Amino acid sequence: MKKLNKRTIAVHGGARRSQYNEVSEAIFLTQGFVYPTAEDAEARFLQAGPDEFIYARYGNPTVAMFEDRMAAMEGSEDGFATASGMAAVNGALTAMLKAGDHVVSSRALFGSCLYILEEVLARFGVEVSFVDGTDLAQWEAAIRPDTKAVFFESVSNPTLQVIDITGVSKLAHAVGATVIVDNVFATPVFSRAIAQGADVVVYSATKHIDGQGRALGGVILGTREFIRGTVEPYMKHTGGSMSPFTAWMMVKGLETIDLRVRTQAFSAQLLAERLQGHKALKNVIYPGLDTHPQQALATAQMGAGGTVLSFDCGTQEAAFKVLNALNIVLISNNLGDAKSIATHPATTTHQRLPDDQKEMLGITPGLVRLSVGLEDVEDLTADLLGALG
């Protein structure tokens, strides 16, 4: 299966069929499983087989389909599905870290990721050093012989900085550190993170994988040893597992993810080019534009600019006027949806960051993040230009 192209894997990967040989994957909507004898129950609790299950918090056939399909797409050995994207980030980090460990992280992160690193891990005695993720010299200076892990968003939210996965991985692996990459903006379609050096890749399945704004979900991808030996014991005992019904929705979402994401990225590129230089905007940020400082890296790493762009209206007042004048694009705080969504990060997703930290990260009062959906790109262009006018 891993030798097939991603679009084929997204449709067929990890399929488990019941005795009825259904075409559409079945939902095994059960939290428990029956054993023929007490001896069978004892044996399964001692060592469950590759397709044997005990309790839905530990594993479920529908969830396993999603995990296997995602692992095949990403090129990893295994995966563990979680209740949300943040459960995936928290699980990947917390499962492997202990008091006294050292982590190096890029500074440009989603607000909840920052909370885990600055508040949760620090509270339990983990030392975290932050760097400008785009500067390999800062990574090299911060990574120490005792560094246990490095963490970064391959494309940062919402200022769309692109981090050199291969470059950071080489520096981390030189001291034996684990490379954990939040790869949401790259999407499983454009991702080659494992091949580029990442050890662990996490996704918020809430975004492009579902793609229709229906459910929360996440997944941690890595080696079988890391997933089953480190992540699974932590996640199954702390309760962050994905539900079978959510896993079924994610499996069905994967069937169309390649078509959706490529269309969204094509539209995002067009929109960024059309908005660039508009008199009402201070600047337009999109990794596919030649004005983006990491355009070459984005092209080499992903092969596309992604589905999200940001633009700066100058002031919060101007940004709100633009948002309120939109007719097609929705005001919300998700991304990766079939519907185009505009967000004002400074007052929503990154509201709790101190002003000096917002300024340092480039989250200005006028910044708007636009997640491009599946609407006709000409209609989106008219909507945006009309709102800007």
Image (spheres, grey):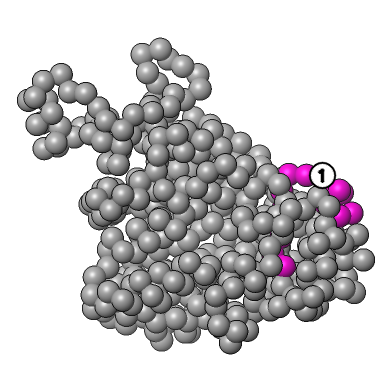
Q: Position of residue 86 (x, y in %)?
A: 44, 58
Measured from the top left, where is residue 264 in percent x and y?
Answer: 70, 49
Q: Amino acid at mark 1?
A: Asp
Residue sitting at the far left: 39
Q: Residue at x 28, y 81 (%)?
A: 145
Residue 274 can be seen in this image:
no
Of residues 331 and 23, the one drawn nearer to the viewer in this rendering: 331
Q: For residue 260, what is the image quadrant?
A: top right
Picture quarter with the C terminus: bottom right
Label 1: element kind: loop
Q: Is residue 244 visible?
A: yes
* Residue 244 counted in the magenta span: no
Magenta segment, which residues?
368-383
- For this orientation, the residue located farthest to the top is 20
Quadrant hosting residue 300: bottom right
| Residue 375 left/right relative to 371 | right
The residue that mark 1 highlights is 376
Q: Is residue 202 above or below residue 77?
A: below
Residue ID at (35%, 59%)? 92
Residue lying at 31% horizontally and 49% vertically, measured from the top left: 239
Residue 297 pos. (x, y %)? 60, 67
Give 242 or 186, whichever is nearer the viewer. 242
Count of marks placed on residues: 1
